[in-house]
Image: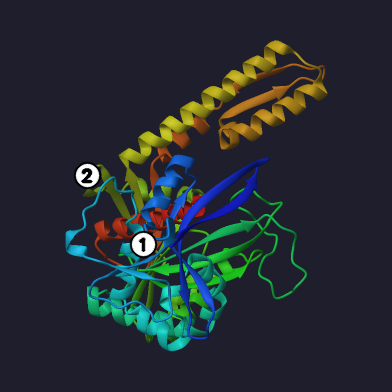
Amino acid sequence: MFLKCSTRRKDGKTHRSWSIVESHRCSDGRVAQRHVLYLGEINDSQRLAWEKSIAVFDQERGHQRQIALFPEDRKPDPGGAEALSLRLDQLRLENPRQWGACWLGDQLWQTLNLDRFFGSRLGVNARLVQDDTLYRSLDRLLEHKEALFSHLRQRWDELFKVRFEVLLYDLTRTYFECEAPEDPSDPRRFGYSRDRRGDCVQVVVALVVTPDGFPLAYEMFPGNTADKTTLKEMLQTIQGRHGRADRIWVMDRGIPTEEILTELRSQTDVPVRYLVGTPKGRLGRCEAELAGLPWQEVRSRVRVKLLPKDGEVYVLAQSQDRTSKEQAMRRRKLKAYWKRLKELQAQQPDRDLLLRKLGGAEQKAGKITKMVQVRIFPQGGLEFTLDRKRLKEVRNREGRYLLRTNLGSEDPARIWQAYMQLSQVEEAFRTLKAI
């Protein structure tokens, strides 16, 4: 084993990272290097300490030499580097570094029998596998995608008795800072960017998971794909992979169209049930009917109202914690927008400059601008007043969610729990994209 240095430049600076590497001779005579431990950026004294820990001093020759370490119950590979046998039961740990994720990953790999699954299909020497090697081999996995999901489903069922009657479906986008590819089959395309990077090409990633977090399917769509066009394909994918069954799909409001929901309600052989988020604008259509219904407590600080209508059940849910959060956000933005309007009123810029500054303030304030009525005079200057009617409407809807479902008289607590699990999937997407 020896220390290997990797160099890269970023922001005009040179960064050197170090790894412990072991040379391994392959059956065809090639010598490959296997990364044993990534050390990151270390100083000279730390580097010398690590060099001493992976090398031995030959007293007869008077210099240090590389040596491979093996436990006493294993035999080294013939033709490899000189080996030193270790008594593992007498080793002790001093000044440890955090390095446990790889062991957890290896344990999951073995438990899910992925070593046998990929070993019979890819024929990769596990001792030579590195992170870069795995990234380069991802394209080779595509042909085994269906077999992999089938294998994982069976293994999860054996280990955890996972049930698949409730499925969470969500989409996310990830962008690439590159030019649009010329290859028409490349899915990286310009499209609506929730990351506010409309200048970058992107792809759409769709994921179906169980409430326990087990992924059942994923698909990658071109970056210009509309969310509402993906649901039919995912329904067919799940039915083809796991058979037709009575399942409940939990989705966000932008995924299904009215036509698809009508089609799902009309299926009688194997019904597909759903729970879908609904835009708050639809709340106005049902507000009068919901006003006369009683609240039902489903958990601490959460209550719901159920309104059967047109073959569906509308679920109005209110969370006191979410209400407090939305109130604080609205007050903070409204206060900042009101302060900026006062500044513009005091500055009295000419009309053209005022319009530009007002546009910047409105862009920053967002939906808050609907609560303030602004009047600009032809000669310049402005006046503004608070739209109290609009403010009252916003207050009444803060912390409330309008859902729709064809579950019928399902337990309202279960409905709320299923939708909150969908929000956890969305949070997981945001976390993964931030890594």
Residue 47 is labelled as none
Q: Left of 339 or right of it: where is 393?
A: left
Q: Which residue is mark 2?
A: 300
Q: Residue at x 55, y 27 (%)?
A: 387
**Observer-nearest of 399 and 191:** 191
Say which quadrant the N terminus sits in: bottom left
What's the amino acid at mark 1?
Cys
- Of all residues, the one furthest to the top in this rendering is 346
**Of helix, strand and loop, which one carries label 1?**
helix
Q: Is residue 327 visible?
A: yes
Image coordinates of residue 275 in percent, x first then y, are 39, 64
Colouring style: rainbow
- State the image coordinates of residue 156 (x, y, percent, origin top left): 29, 76
Label 2 to label 1, Cα distance in Å? Answer: 40 Å
Q: Quadrant of residue 228?
A: bottom right
Instruction: Provide residue 42's location: percent of width, then percent of height.
Output: 47, 44
Q: Amino acid at mark 2?
A: Ser
Q: Give 400 or 17, whichever is nearer the viewer.
A: 17
User: Foreground residue, 258 or 358?
Assistant: 358
Residue 232 showing in the rendered view: no
